[in-house]
């Protein structure tokens, strides 16, 4: 399986996150992580360019992406060299996982338009970070037009087009920054850009199936990107752009090209032939590292949560409310299924940051609250909450839902509320599992990676609420580790992703098992959660208008 | 109007609260409060005898009542003497307002049974403080039997008999402490006991219309106390006790008797003839001091809230869900109407004590939160809450309801939540006003006394939500001031309560007026509140079982 005769080989996984990029060098045989290098983006605050006048705006500086590539590669190569590892083996490949949908305009050379001095100060020429919501009106317009035209595209992306996604952002750019739009030779996702920067592919860059399928509504079911006639109804220039985008996509195990010789020299890989894999999204790569396979759901749990599984069905079938069902988007040859929750760690952070009294505050607020909350039997708080403080991504797909907590007495304590919020996210996770299962994809076990995996409280609650064992992913850098798995395939160290995954990824020995008493208590509480979920969240629910009217009143109060 | 020729006269109002008793000496002509004396009950914690094994138990030490009488009278008399006031005028009367329903067993001399050394250590022989809930099962039994027998009594006390009330407590005593019950020659309310202690009336004590009508279901509509046949169905010994209770009741402006000579001598009123008025409940006396009259609702707002108004209808008419509609219970000759909210100040205290982060905590937590909350326009929080953390007294009469808050985002702040809780209590207050108005008693303005009257935030929110001017009562000791008004009538300084009230009570110059923009915003929010109120709180509401099931699950979680 390994390159060379008995020699070791290494794959480098790159993870372009929201605040920084990270490279991890992984042994392709053992999965051991030998070296790590992190590059915090200098642009903006925490890597994000904001606009004080528009809370919806979130961009990134493409120059940071260029610099991160060289810096992190040089960092891990130097560390490998320092360990003497480069003498014992070779770097066979580089894989790329990034945030998304994070589209950006390109110039005729296939470089980010923002690198052109003419556009250096124009936010529209920057990368439109996943959490940029400036194009909410365009997203609604796309959804409405797709419904009106009865086009099938939305069925595979959850039923509602999001303001976070590719076409909405580009349409918004065409309307609000027409000079940028006109100057763009093409657009790509960050997950396409990084391999292109590494290989020097320019506009011939390979496009990844993951971003294309989940965000640009690309599918072979309808011959690729959405029809030009549909795009023209949104804006004639979008139909024109379609011809300058792409007709084909590749899974992340494919080789995008070889590392540019000049870059290889600068990062300490002079004269070596290093494969660069096609890109993918961070959560999807993390799922691969977590051992995703049919019947297993991998949850990447951080500020928000992304859930992935795969099915060996012959072609994608829509699952209502589930953000994406896309061929090859997780593992090549399988249909990827992606869902998510809009606030998980963010919800716990909101509570500790905003509502924790002195006794539970401070840098160890989560530990103190968790310790006290762990001592409570399930149901002892008398509370049930809805986990919608940042809206609901799956299965209601409604950003205008909000939080709710019910059952407070005059004796309700902060650990009780904290536990209720953890439980609420677990109930939300169960709704997703049940929705996927209802569409005939049984989920037998659950693997978690990301920062929340470190919370014993959360993991035990999830096991009890889901009624399934919850395992922890082996890697603490799951997205980078997943990118390294694809790098190993692209570099020839393994013949396919499944075998690379078996060698390099998978779960740790930690397992949280459902406790029968807790499972019983949570059955009752989950039924109460679903009553509230349906009453407040589903169109036609008894109280479905309440949260939206509160948003409306709030908006009006500042008018 | 005044006793003596041109000389001043004073009335002393006694207010027996939960933690202490207070006496206030008031000028009968001007209403000026000249002297105050407070006696914190030494018994128990904060004046309350608790049982660590039973959170429902709350009793008081009758000896504390005896000692408080002498101590507080002596205190105000000494203060009057020190001011030279006793030389310029005379103390014409003493009035009494107390908590209730706070029943206690009496010996054959009409003294509290607890003063007998044989019962000195028996909690059942103590006073059963208003917030004692040990008799919840008996209360439910009384309600059920009244419904089954289709008896009219409940209609005038809100439709549900409470565990806080007279018969439930005595029935519980008869079952759990039969020796105490057997030894009791009679039972009385604290509001009957204090005048009896002051006059030496013994078992011949006069009984007050307020406690009898609101708590013991006494009404001339059915010939006094509930029928012996009904009481016998609960327990034969209750029917027997009925004969040792009372056939008649008096309004608080009546004279109960004259201050005992020995007590007068000990408190510095040697040789003077001082009338003692019949007792009443603290909130009702407070309403009188606040200028209650037909069309005016007086709210005594502290940890919980008691609302009173009066109507000149010829006889009481039931108002569904309103705790009491009783002849003579507030002002003699008028029908008193009493409603209440179970948690107001307690709700705000719960938040500051439990959930306020360091920046908003400390002794001035309420001020800091109020200042920040006042800066928010109505509706700006996007929140609406239900004020049921301690159940709902009026109009749902359901102690098993609990709190709810909806609309939280990841940006929701403590002042926003604090304001939402203040608003929730104001919506609850509006439900009460609308229920009273629906039964043809228009409410034109609202007067507030009690600690919450000092909150400018709360008062403005109440004016805006109620759409009515909110005035503050003149006295900061409204219950004692109301008792002094009755003392002045009993002592002959005024011919009737209305004229005493006009001279001594009423409102201050502070008025909070509804602001039209805020009124409009709160109209919409109040509609959302009533949707939640009805969905969660009314039998048959879409989500009516949710809070009760949470209580059930909580109870089960400790089993």
Image (cartoon, coloured by chain):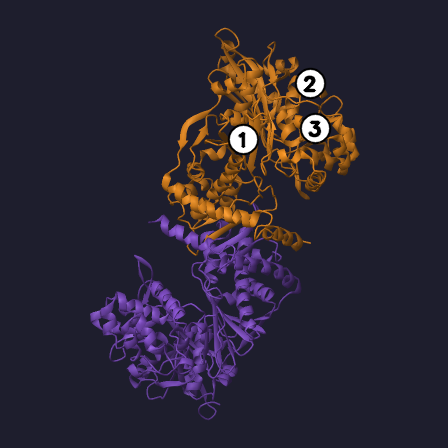
Chain colours: A purple, B orange
- Is the C terminus of chain B in the top left, top right, bottom left or bottom right quadrant? bottom right
Q: In terms of depth relative to the viewer, which is nearer, B390 or B57?
A: B390
Q: Secondary structure at mark 1?
A: strand
Q: Which mark is residue A370?
A: none
Real-space Cα separation, disc 3 to disc 2, in angstroms: 21 Å
Q: Are marks 3 and 2 in contact (CB under 8 Å)?
A: no
Going from N to C along the chain, the mark reached first, 3 or 1, is 3
Q: Whole-Å distance between the Cαs marked 3 and 1?
A: 23 Å
Q: Looking at this view, is B78 or A159 the one in front?
A: A159
Residue B416 in sight in this render: yes
Which is more toward the observer, A472 or B203?
A: B203
Q: Position of residue B122 (x, y in %)?
A: 73, 34
Q: Is residue A177 left or right of residue A370?
A: left
> Which mark lies nearer to you, 3 or 2?
3
Chain containing the residue with disc 1: B
Do circles 3 and 1 both sit on a common chain?
yes
* Image quadrant assignment for residue B91: top right
Contact? badges 3 and 1 (CB < 8 Å): no
Q: Which residue is mark 2?
A: B201
Quadrant of res A124: bottom left
Whether residue A316 sits left or right of residue A278 in the image: it is right
Q: Which residue is mark 3?
A: B225
Whether residue A18 is visible to the viewer of this picture, yes or no, is: no
- List the residue tagged with mark 1: B308
Q: Chain of mark 3?
A: B
Say whether marks 1 and 2 touch (CB < 8 Å).
no
């Amino acid at each position: 399986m390994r390159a060379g005769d008995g020699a070791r080989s290494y794959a480098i996984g790159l993870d372009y996150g929201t605040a920084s990029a990270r490279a991890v060098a992984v042994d392709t045989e053992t999965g051991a992580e030998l070296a790590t290098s992190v590059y915090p983006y200098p642009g903006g605050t925490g890597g994000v360019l904001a606009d004080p006048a528009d809370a919806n705006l979130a961009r990134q500086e493409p120059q940071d992406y260029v610099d991160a590539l060289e810096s992190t590669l040089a960092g891990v190569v130097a560390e490998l060299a320092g360990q003497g590892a480069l003498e014992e083996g070779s770097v066979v490949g580089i894989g790329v996982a990034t945030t998304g949908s994070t589209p950006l305009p390109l110039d005729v050379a296939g470089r980010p338009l923002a690198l052109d001095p003419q556009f250096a100060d124009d936010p529209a020429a920057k990368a439109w970070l996943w959490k940029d919501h400036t194009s909410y009106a365009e997203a609604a317009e796309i959804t409405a037009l797709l419904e009106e035209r009865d086009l099938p595209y939305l069925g595979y992306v959850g039923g509602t087009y999001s303001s976070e996604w590719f076409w909405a952002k580009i349409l918004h750019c065409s309307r609000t920054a027409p000079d940028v739009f006109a100057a763009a030779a093409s657009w790509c996702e960050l997950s396409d850009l990084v391999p292109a920067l590494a290989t020097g592919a320019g506009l011939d860059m390979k496009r990844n199936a993951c971003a294309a399928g989940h965000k640009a509504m690309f599918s072979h079911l309808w011959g690729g990107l959405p029809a030009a006639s549909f795009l023209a109804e949104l804006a004639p220039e979008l139909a024109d752009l379609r011809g300058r985008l792409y007709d084909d996509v590749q899974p992340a195990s494919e080789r995008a090209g070889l590392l540019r010789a000049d870059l290889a020299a600068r990062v300490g890989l002079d004269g070596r032939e290093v494969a660069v894999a096609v890109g993918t999204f961070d959560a999807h790569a993390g799922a691969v590292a977590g051992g995703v396979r049919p019947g297993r759901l991998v949850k990447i749990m951080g500020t928000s949560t992304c859930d992935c599984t795969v099915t060996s069905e012959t072609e994608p079938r829509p699952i209502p409310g589930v953000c994406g069902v896309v061929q090859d988007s997780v593992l090549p040859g399988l249909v990827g299924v992606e869902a998510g929750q809009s606030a998980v760690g963010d919800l716990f952070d909101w509570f500790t940051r905003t509502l924790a009294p002195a006794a539970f505050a401070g840098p160890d607020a989560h530990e103190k609250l968790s310790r006290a909350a762990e001592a409570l039997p399930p149901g002892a708080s008398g509370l049930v909450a809805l986990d919608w403080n940042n809206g609901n991504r799956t299965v209601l797909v409604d950003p205008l839902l909000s939080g709710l907590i019910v059952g407070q007495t005059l004796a309700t304590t902060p650990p009780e509320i904290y536990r209720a919020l953890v439980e609420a996210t677990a109930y939300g996770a169960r709704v997703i599992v049940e929705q996927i299962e209802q569409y005939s994809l049984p989920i037998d076990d659950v693997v978690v990676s990301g920062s929340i995996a470190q919370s014993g409280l959360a993991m035990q609650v999830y096991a009890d609420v889901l009624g399934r064992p919850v395992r922890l992913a082996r890697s603490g850098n799951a997205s980078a580790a997943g990118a390294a798995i694809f790098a190993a395939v692209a570099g020839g160290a393994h013949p396919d992703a499944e075998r690379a995954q078996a060698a390099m990824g998978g779960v740790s020995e930690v397992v949280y098992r459902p406790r029968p008493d807790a499972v019983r208590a949570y059955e009752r509480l989950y039924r109460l959660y679903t009553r509230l979920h349906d009453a407040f969240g589903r169109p036609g629910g008894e109280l479905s208008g309440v949260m939206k009217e509160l948003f409306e009143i709030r908006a009006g109060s500042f008018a």
